[in-house]
Amino acid sequence: MVTAIVIPIVLAYFYWLTKKEMQANFQEWLKLENIPEEAIVSGKIIGVHDYKERFYYHRYNHVTVLKINTGLKEVTVKKVTPLRKGAVPPRFNEGEMVHLYGNWKQGFFSINRAIKQNEGA
């Protein structure tokens, strides 16, 4: 008789805990799009690498890693885009001149916004 009462309570508790964890991860996943624009990196793209990574169970990110020649040194930058329905990750090509807005985090520059420029302009 005790198990008839305790088992549903335990199941309900773990269901509630899992829902709470999934909501927290969903909010964290969405925050990957909004990076504070604290710095700017400008230069020419000398390398582009795209890949898809798993964030949490059925949530994925599209990650673009760029090598930028600023004129003084080469900088590695990352653009992380949560893959949602209808989301189109930005495309970059080698040789493009870009201005990248974002911040420095974990040893690399994280991009929030990118502005491409024509080389002749």
Image (cartoon, rainbow, N blue to C red):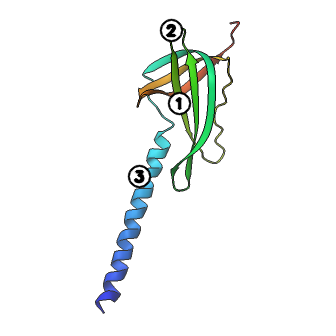
| 15 with respect to 112 (left or right) | left
Q: Are marks 2 and 1 in contact (CB under 8 Å)?
A: no
Q: Are marks 2 and 3 in contact (CB under 8 Å)?
A: no
Q: Which residue is mark 1?
A: 78
Q: Which residue is mark 2?
A: 72
Q: Residue furthest bottom?
A: 1
In the image, is residue 25 above or below residue 118?
below
Q: CA distance from mark 3 to mark 1?
A: 23 Å
Along the line of sight, the residue nearer the viewer: 87 or 46? 46
Identify the disc placed on residue 24. 3
Label 1: few (<14), some (14–19) or many (≥20) C-alpha neighbours in 10 Å: some
| 101 with respect to 5 (left or right) | right
The mark total stands at 3
Quarter-wise, where is residue 38 in the image?
Answer: top left
- The local secondary structure at tag 3 comes to helix
Quarter-wise, where is residue 15 in the image?
Answer: bottom left
Foreground mark, 2 or 1, reads 2
**Residue 110 appears at what percent x and percent y?**
48, 29
In the image, is residue 120 above or below residue 115?
above
Q: Amino acid at mark 1?
A: Lys
Along the line of sight, the residue nearer the viewer: 59 or 71? 71
Q: CA distance from mark 2 to mark 1?
A: 19 Å
